[in-house]
Amino acid sequence: MMAYSTMEKVRKVLVHLSKENAAPQCARFVQSITGHFVGHEDEAHVSCSLDNNIFILCDRLCDGGVPLKRASFCPIKYLSDSEAVSLPPDTLSRGVEVAVAVLLQSSNQRLLLTRRTSNLRIFPNIWVPPGGHVELDEKLLDAGLRELREETGLKLSPDEISSQLLGLWESVYPPMLSRGPPQRHHVVAYMLLKSTQSHLQLQACLRPQPAEVSACVWVDADLGKFVVSAVDGEKDPVRIPADLPQTISVTGVSPRGELSETSLPAALFCNRAPDHGEDLERVSTGTKFALELWLKTLGPHAEMG
């Protein structure tokens, strides 16, 4: 067992980093997690473990590791020393927190995404998988199942699903320096949970939490590929494939929790993160990374319906 030091009283699960067999050290809020392993590049392969409320990332790849990625425009990557030291003390003292996001796959290969409500402080009105912070003394899977239950009402037990850690995303809010200094810094663990129920069976049990979720959608591989093609930070136009519907069926959630079937333009799901001004309703950059990993698990001959 590795020896390492941490805060005298742990109040939340924080990221610790280990490189070249060094003892894990608690990552600073302004420290680039991805950059710690690959310098100025945006993707690394790491091993991760959660032990005694310490989430450790290291470069020893005994099991092949998982991808760790950040956006090309990640604010921490471009933060100058003077900008870093000028951040408020309560922000600098946060550390890098750990979150889990659940990629719930139905038996007919649909994936559940939820739209965050417009009044949330972080990433409002953005499409993401269900998820949230890992709490003290939780395993990643337990945290994922809890967040899934709290946000969507879906109560799944570990023996009902198979689970796999697909990858890690370095998430910063606001997502670009041009939109303000960093306020939150997380590593998000994307977990694929495969259910034996179809998306219609799961849909019948949906009871979304209206304080957090304003809509839900089941993404198939065709829509997933379209979303992934709209790479944030690039400017080339994205064309809707001829075989993709112009509108996508979604389930709206009223402030009182009532569900209603509605539709949104398919083009909305290829919106990119804007450099300035108000954000757009869009699929988050980290979710696009997760969808790309998910599509690879389906293989070239995956069902599209």
Image (cartoon, helix red, strand yellow):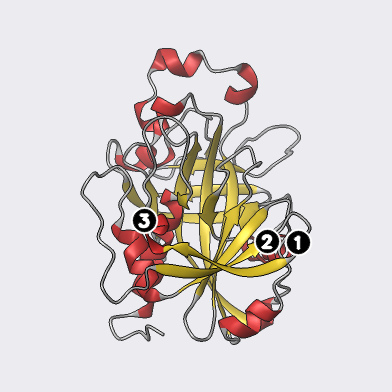
Along the line of sight, which residue is nearer the eye, 40 or 290? 290
Q: Position of residue 270 (x, y in %)?
A: 36, 56
**Label 3 with label 2: CB-CB less than 8 Å:** no
**Label 2 with label 1: CB-CB less than 8 Å:** yes
Say which residue appears at 63% left-offset and 37% top-offset: 121
Residue assigned mark 2:
253
**Residue 290 appears in view:** yes
Say which residue appears at 48% left-offset and 27% top-offset: 30
Residue assigned mark 1:
257
Q: CA distance from mark 2 to mark 1?
A: 6 Å
Q: Position of residue 155 (x, y in %)?
A: 73, 73
Name the amino acid type tagged 3: Cys
Residue assigned mark 3:
270
Along the line of sight, which residue is nearer the eye, 287 or 63? 287
Q: CA distance from mark 1 to mark 3?
A: 27 Å
Q: Position of residue 8 (x, y in %)?
A: 73, 32
Name the amino acid type tagged 2: Val
**SS label for mark 1:** loop
Q: Position of residue 160 (x, y in %)?
A: 66, 83
**SS label for mark 3:** helix
Q: Which quarter of the rendering shows the C terminus?
A: bottom left
**Label 1 with label 3: CB-CB less than 8 Å:** no
Q: Is residue 64 above or below residue 17?
A: below
Say which residue appears at 43% left-offset and 68% top-offset: 247
**SS label for mark 2:** strand
In this view, the residue farthest toward the right is 256
